[in-house]
Amino acid sequence: MTLHSLLSLPVLSHRLGGKLDFSRMDEQQIMSLAIALEEEDARIYNTYAQALAADYPDTAALFRAMAAEEDGHRHRLIELYRARFGEHILLIRREDVRGFVTRKPVWLAQPLDLERIRAQAEIMEADSRRFYAQAARRSGDAAIRQLLGDLAAEESRHESKAETLGNEFITARTLHRERETQRRLFVLQYIQPGLAGLMDGSVSTLAPLFAAAFATHDTWSTFLVGLAAAIGAGISMAFAEALSDDGALTGRGSPLIRGAVTGAMTAVGGLGHTLPYLIPRFDAATALAIAIVGVELVAIAWVRKRYMEAPFGLAVLQVIVGGLIVLAAGILIGAA
């Protein structure tokens, strides 16, 4: 190994507080980086495939095929590297080279967004094509230049090849089924917890808020009661939801996320009809609060119809009628 190569190793470069400059990298370093990039891309595609296998088997097959393509590129790079530079491959990764953009770990996002993952795959292929095109132009070794140029051409065709693989693995029926699965996961992980919180916050805080309002006719005291009820209900619902199900068997996702969504929506539901009592005039504040209650109950009924497929009439009966009964109870208790 030359002194230049040793001084260009990432470890020494980071000790000097910098990164490798691609324009100054030699062919051994470029080939080492190319091998690392292909290994990373194959690992990401296999991660996508593993994460999607249970709910999206056809898309998982697509990403397994793409991972196999990247493995093929890696084998060709290693074969030529071994012939030119020997058995030791330099440890150079994308984060060691100036100009590479750090990839967001899309595969960690829950619920998995298929369109986002496919868009990320297209970006990965475009990045690889640009890298190989630039690397080929800088190489003076005929065999290395030919291989890098061939890989650049293959990466430029990979998008259309991925589309061909997509047509093979992902039919219109498959896309419809996967979109339905994605919608179901979204409902389970976000809509259901959020709706439960919104219903609890909007309905359970009605009685204490309006009881305090009609008992005191003091808007500030009523606001404090409503604020305490909304925040207290939000905290309680957040813990109850997070501790009720870890999501391992039900597929409802992270308990922390569900708890946060439930708690936040509970607080929002309670604060909606509490905020009007910042208005000093009791009659105006109460009229506005009651109007907001009506909007909240209609919104909850619509969400139940839209995402939970509940008949709108039944949703109105369950939510609006029940909410109005709780509202009336609070007014009657406060006025007694």
Image (cartoon, grey):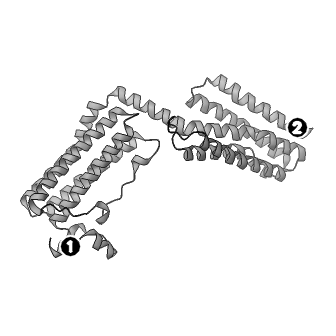
Q: Is residue 236 left or right of residue 335?
A: left
Q: Position of residue 189 (x, y in %)?
A: 53, 39
Q: Which residue is mark 1?
A: 6
Q: Position of residue 150 (x, y in %)?
A: 13, 50
Separation of residues labelled 1 and 2 (CA atoms):
82 Å
Q: Secondary structure at mark 2?
A: helix
Q: Secondary structure at mark 1?
A: helix
Q: Is residue 289 left or right of residue 237?
A: right
- The amino acid type of the residue labelled 1 equals Leu
Q: In the rendered image, which quarter is residue 286 located in?
A: top right
Above-or-below relation of 269 to 145: above
Above-or-below relation of 192 to 233: above
| Count of marks, rendered view | 2
Image point (27%, 32%), residue name: 167
Q: In the rendered image, which quarter is residue 57 located in?
A: top left
Report the front residue among 33 and 294: 33
Residue farthest toward the left in the current orientation of the protein: 142
State the quadrant of the C terminus.
top right
Report the front residue among 194 and 89: 89
Q: Which residue is mark 2?
A: 333
Image point (82%, 41%), residue name: 210
